[in-house]
Amino acid sequence: MTLKWWQKAVFYQIYPRSFADGNADGIGDFRGMTEKLDYLKDLGVDAIWLSPHFPSPNWDCGYDISDYCDVAPEYGSLDDFKNFLHEAHSRDMRVILDLVLNHTSDQHPWFLESKSSRDNPKADWYVWVDSPPNNWQSCFDGEAWTYAPERKQYYYHYFMRQQPDLNWHNPQVIGAMWAAVRFWLDLGVDGYRLDAIGTIFEDPQLTSHDVPLDLAGLRHLSDLAKTPEEKETVGKYWHEMFKHQWGQPGVHDLMKQLRAILDEYPGERVLVGEDDNPEYMGDGANELNMVFNFPLMRTDNPLMPAWIRQNQKERLAALAKISAEAWPCNTFGNHDSSRVYSHYADGTHDAERARLALAIMLTLKGTPFLYNGEEIGMTDYPVSDPNRMRDTMATWYYQRLVDDLKVEPIEAARRAASSSRDRVRTPMQWSNSANAGFSPSSVETWLPVNPNYSEGINVRDQHADPLSLWHFYKRMLRMRKTTPALIEGDYKPVHEKADDYLAFLRRTPQQAVLVVLSFSQQRQVLSFSSLPYKTAHTIFSSAGRSKADENLKEIHLGAFEIFIAEVH
Ligand code: GLC
């Protein structure tokens, strides 16, 4: 089988604002990112996904773009970007960008023109109505329809009011966006991660939702839901509230157009969708190359073998329906969701569970996406001082709780902070010096630095400690690269009833690898004698077992051991 580069690669998401501050202003930038390319190469990263680096008023931390063909001044210049791309490529690392199609910033010249009158050339580039036709909500800030006095009309926004939705029924919009897509492809970028594609079209009937709450009320109810029944109601309400505003049919056609553009370029450019629906891969060759397996990460409980097994069963079956070659794409964290280390912690074996999470990521079938900082075990850091919150989704909710729902300010801040995305976007912790070495001590960083950098959660200290999580990441990434079956092989679960460990085979015609991951603090003695193999040659063991061959009839598995072996 000849795989494409993106099927073999391990991706690493950089959140530009928080990764590396090259000019000491408290904000990450291209100079900083370029200086860290050797760091990423050394870690074992093959490809980088950059969250938006475009000019933006930052109502949604860069996901509100005011110019699709430039670089935000705080991150540097277009030349800095070109230099970054060149330096990445010269280290044999690929770079994909974030493509936000659904909306622009309300400061984008397209919107400024569109809202200026009802008959300007871009009057029809956004979604305008005379008065709100329904009770739709924005998933970030309440009412989905906002009044523009210039036109005496309302525009639609699925996200913040500063992120008006484009009218994708207008061919001029499509043309303008595809031109921007080509701009970066011409510069040599290797593809795109597609933002929020499900929200591009809305129900043409404009049907109202029938949830007896608005957004603030629903978030409030979500916070208070404790029992499984309450949580189920809340889940149903979320679905019902937004079901008319996403998942509409037109997206497939757009994805086909986009794919055709990428396929014109040499070098196998890639598209990965921020959506878990495999149908956006079209027939397997005419829409997106990959969509994220988000269901895998959506568990409130610590990750458990049964959960992962079930996910793989469903996921691989869903992909197989698309085509025999449809390729999986797994992740445990990104700039919107709880950090891996915090999310899957159980309070007693957090470090072991973080290692297990990586082992799962790197041994399941599919392309893994890691999120910056997870390699040193960065944790969620709730920012509860309203003056320092930067996620406007959180500040909006805080204000609604205090003003409308009469929640005490301290409690409101705690609740807003606990779901705010600021908690996973704090600056990268590079060393055990002030500001975690992200910026000089005299500088106020854009979000506060998590003080736990002084407890060993920083790159420099972990470099110096061969037993650190960072070294574990590096070892595992290296091991994956040199074990073809972990990249190309099929996935075959074994011992499917086991509660305390997850075991599966990854097989190519040339190599069979057995992966056994212990989720237990007890030692276990396992027999794999029903498999058509006798011996296991250790490739990787987190318990430091010797490289001698093991007898498959009797494998002694240590507590939380990660055991990976080539079987014969
Ligand atoms: C995606 C991004 C998120 C952003 C939203 C609107 O979900 O991941 O950060 O706020 O789209 O662009």
Image: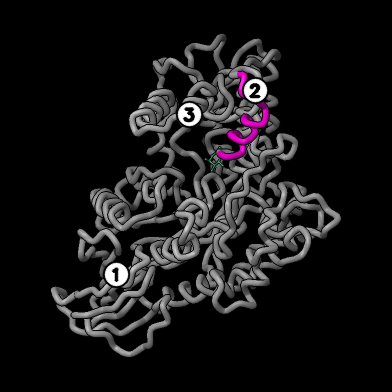
Please state if 301 lies on the left or on the right of 449 as rendered. left
Dot 2 corresponds to which residue?
402
Dot 1 corresponds to which residue?
489
What's the distance in space between the residues labelled 1 and 3, CA to CA? 44 Å
Which element carries disc 3, helix, strand or loop? helix
Q: Quadrant of residue 124?
A: top right
- The number of discs equals 3
Q: Residues within 10 Å of mark 1 (few under 14, many from 20)?
A: many
Above/below status of 555 relative to 310 = below
Residue depicted at 41% across the width and 50% down the height: 297
Considering every residue shown, the one lying at the far bottom of the view is: 548
Residue 409: in magenta span = yes
Which element carries disc 1, helix, strand or loop? loop
Q: Position of residue 126 (x, y in %)?
A: 57, 25
Q: Position of residue 197 (x, y in %)?
A: 46, 39
Dot 3 corresponds to which residue?
224
Please state if 132 lies on the left or on the right of 396 as rendered. left
Q: Quadrant of residue 148?
A: top right
Q: Residues within 10 Å of mark 3 (few under 14, many from 20)?
A: few
